[in-house]
Amino acid sequence: MSSNSGNRFGRFPGEQTNQNNRITFQFDGQSVNSYAGESVAAALIAAGVYATRLSEKGMPRGYFCGMGVCWECIVRINGISTERACRQTVEDGMIVETVKAVKKEWPS
Ligand code: FES
């Protein structure tokens, strides 16, 4: 898995990414190349990853709002399972993993 500039928009005024500073992180054990300042979601979409978690029934879930409201994009980052991919900025060497939902057991 690598970054694919074909999935990225062109540069626009006010953009915070630095395309002269490439960084690499891991997603489910594979290397993903990205640019400093990108969100984890943007880097994963550029790499062709559209599902970041699995529902209780094992259905893939991914980005919906892109602004931190819906929580559909949660991933595990460096062992923390409740990070929103669209709100976290990539860091060199970070470990990002798919989150698998755990079936809730309600008290009877
Ligand atoms: S896509 Fe909605 S919180 Fe990340």
Image (cartoon, helix red, strand yellow):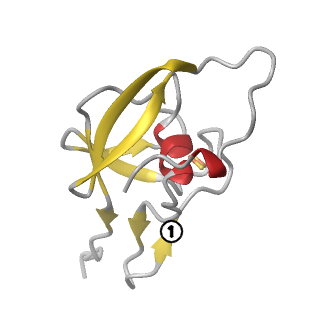
The extreme right residue here reads 13
Mark 1 C-beta closer than 8 Å to ligand 1: no
102 horizontally vs 48: left or right:
left
Q: Is disc 1 placed on a helix, strand or loop? A: strand
Residue at image position (39%, 85%) is: 57
> In the image, residue 39 lies at what x, y percent?
51, 34
- The relative height of residue 61 versus residue 70 in the rendered view (above or below) is below
Q: Name the amino acid type tagged 1.
A: Arg
Q: Quadrant of residue 23?
A: top left
- Position of the N terminus, as image quadrant, is bottom left
101 on left or right of 37: left
Q: Position of residue 100 (x, y in %)?
A: 30, 68
Task: Tell me the residue at 60%/51% (across/down).
Answer: 70
Q: In this rendering, would 15 be left or right of 92?
A: right
In which quarter of the view is residue 28 placed?
Answer: bottom left
Q: Nearer the viewer, residue 44 or 5?
A: 5
Q: Residue at x 42, y 26 (%)?
A: 22
Residue at x-position 27% and y-position 71%: 102
Is 67 situated above or below 74? above
Is residue 6 positioned above or below 90 on the image?
below
Q: Which residue is mark 1?
A: 61
Quadrant where the C terminus sits is bottom left
Residue 19 image position (x, y, % from top left): 55, 22
Nearest the viewer among 102 and 77 is 77
